[in-house]
Amino acid sequence: MRAYLLVARMWLRASLAYRTSFWLTALGNAVTSALDFAIIAIMFLHTPALGGWTLPQVAFLYGTSGMTLGLADLAVGSLDQLGQRVRDGSVDTVLVRPAAALAQLSADRFALRRVGRVFQSTLVLLWAVSRLHLDWTPGRLLVMVLLLVCGSVIFGSVFVAGGAFQFFAADAAEVQNSVTYGGATMLQYPPTIYARELVRGVVYGVPLAFVNWLPAMYVLGVPDTLGLPGWFRFASPLAALLCATAAGLAWRAALRSYRSTGS
Amino acid sequence: MAPVLDDVHPPCPPPPDSPPRDPVPPDPVPRFPALGLYAAVGWGSFRRYATYRAATWSGAFTNTVFGFFIAYTYRALWEIRPHLGGYDLSSALTYVWLGQAMLMPVAAMGGGIQDDLEARISNGDIAVDLYRPVDQQAWWLAGDLGRAGYHLLSRGVLPLLVGGLFFRLRMPAGGPAEEALTWCCFLVSTLLAVTVSFSLRYMASLTGFWLLDARGVRQVTLVLGMFFSGFLLPLTLFPSALGQIAQHLPWAGMVQIPEDVFLQRRTGSALLAGLGLQLGWAAVLLGAGRLVQRAAAAKVVVQGG
C-alpha cells in the first residue's frame, strides 16, 4: 500500500507538470464519459422507455456503471498498459524492488485525470436518485453501498486479470477493453434489451451482472424478467469475492511465468 | 620540407574526362518520383501495422463485442420506433456494424499518426523529420493512409462478417451496376473520410509544438469527433437544429456520410453533395494544417542551437 501511494504520488506530480494538458485531459475524461449519457438522453427524446426502463432508471444504471468502472480504473487501470512493460522488459525493475509488484504496477502512470469519469457519473447518479423518489429503507441503503464497493472490486478484478493475461499475450491488451469499457457500456442499458445468452454469459461467466443490474433491481424495485434466483440480487459480495480470488490467482500464476525479454 | 601527409597520400590526378558540374548539387537521397516515395511510405506503414497480428485480432474482437452491445441498444430503440431518423431496423443495425468497421480506419477515436507524431514532437526527434527533403504533411498523410488501408482490411471486415452472421444487415441493393457503383462510392467516401480525419488529427498533434503535451487537445478533439461524426448515433436523431448543423461540419464526413453512401440514402445529387462536402473540408483542413505546420516549423529550436 505504501509503495502504491509513493509511486502514485510520483506520477501525479509528473502529470501536473503540464498543467494545461492535465486539466484538459481531466475535463476531456469527464466529457468523454458524458457523451454516452448524451446518447442515452437523445434516445429518450424518441421513446419514453427502453426495454421497459425509464430515463431516470437507465440513468441510475449509467451512474453506477460509470462510478464503479471509474473507481476501478483510477485505482488499478494502469494495468491495461502492462503489456508494454512486458515487451520491453522493464517489469524486471519492478521485480527487484522490495515491494509488491501488483502495487507498483497498478500505480504505474497513475492518472488522476480518470477522476473525471467518476465525478461525471456521480452527478448523473445523483440526478437519477433525485428523480426516482426511492424509499430509502436501511436494506436499500446497504445494497446501494455494497453495489458501489463490490462493483468497483469486480471491475478492478477484471483489470488485474487482464494485466495477468498480458504477461502471456503482451500485444493483445485490447481484448480486456471489451470486458472493462465494453462491459461498462453494456451495464448502462437495462438487461432486458439484450439476448438471453448474453445475459447468461455475464451472470454465470464474467459476473458483470452483479456490478449493477441485479442490485439495481432490488434498489429500484424492478421486477426480474430474466428468471434468475431471487437471492442473486444480494449476491454481489459473493461475486466480488470470487472475482478477486480468481484475479489474484491468475496474477500469481502470470508473475511466476514471467521470463523477461530475450537476452 | 614537404608536409608528411602529402608523402603518404599523394594528390590524385584529376579523372581523365570529368563530367561538367551541375549548377545544383545533386540530392543526397536517391530521387524517387515523388508519388513513388509517398507510396513507399504508405506501404511501409501498412506493413508495420500488419506486423502485430495479436494486436489486430484482439482489436477486431473488441470492435465486434462493442458492435453487439450497441446493436442491442439500437434494436431496442428501433423496435419501439421503426423508421426512426429515416432508417429501418436493418439499416440501423448495419449502421452500427459498419460504424464499428470504420472506427479504426477513420481513427474516430484518434490515434494512428498521432501517437508517433506527438512522441516525436515531445522528444525532439521531429527535428530529424524536418530535415528530410519531403513534404511533412504528405509524408504523414501517406503513412496514415497506409495504416487506414490495413485497418480497413483487418479490423473492418471481421466485425461486419460477425454482424452479418447474427443480425440481418442491409447490403447495397439494386442491379449489379448500382451495387458496384455504391461500393465504389463508399470506398471513395471512406478515403475522403480518412483524409478529413487525418487533417484534423494532424493539426491537433501539431499543438504539441506549443503545449509540449498534446494529450489534452487530443482528448477534446476525440470528444468532438465521436459525437459529431455520427459514430455513436446517426446525426438525424439529434435534436433538429443541432442535427442540421452537425451534418455540415467536417466530422460528418468521417462516419455519417460514408455510412449513408453505403446504405444508399445518398444517391444522385445527394451523393455528389456528400462527397463534395468531404472533399471541400479535406481541402480546407489540409490547407489550414499547412499554415499550422509552417508556424510550428518556424518555432522549432533544436537543442544546442
Image: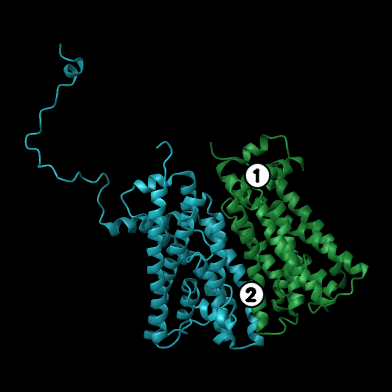
Asked whether A152 or A92 is in front, the reply is A152
Q: Is residue A211 left or right of residue B47?
A: right
State the quadrant of the C terminus of chain B. top left
Mark 1 vs 2: CB contact within 8 A? no
Residue positioned most to the left? B17
Q: Which chain is cyan?
A: B
Query: Which quadrant is home to the N terminus of chain B?
Result: top left
Q: Which mark is residue A39?
A: 2
**Sequence-wise, which precedes: disc 1 or disc 2?**
1
From the image, tell me which residue sits under label 1: A13
Left or right of B283, for residue A60: right
- Which residue is located at x 18 percent, y 46 percent? B24
* SS label for mark 1: helix
Identify which amino acid the numbered label 1 is placed on. Arg
Which chain contains the residue that carries disc 2? Answer: A
Q: Which residue is drawn at 37% across and 68% down?
A: B283
Pair 1/2: label in front? 1
State the residue lying farthest toward the top.
B1
Q: Nearer the viewer, residue A217 or A131?
A: A131
**The colour assigned to chain A within the rendered structure:** green
Taking the image as drawn, is residue A138 in sight? Answer: yes
As drawn, A249 above or below A262 = below
- Percent position (x, y) of residue B80? 67, 87
Residue B141: horizontal and vertical position, in percent?
A: 39, 60
Q: Distance between the Cα atoms at labels 1 and 2? A: 35 Å
The disc at residue B304 is: none
Q: Position of residue A175 (x, y in %)?
A: 61, 59
Residue A133 percent location from the top left of the image: 85, 76
Amino acid type, residue under disc 2 in the picture: Ile
- Residue at screen point 69% across, 43% down: A9
Indicate the chain on which mark 1 is placed.
A
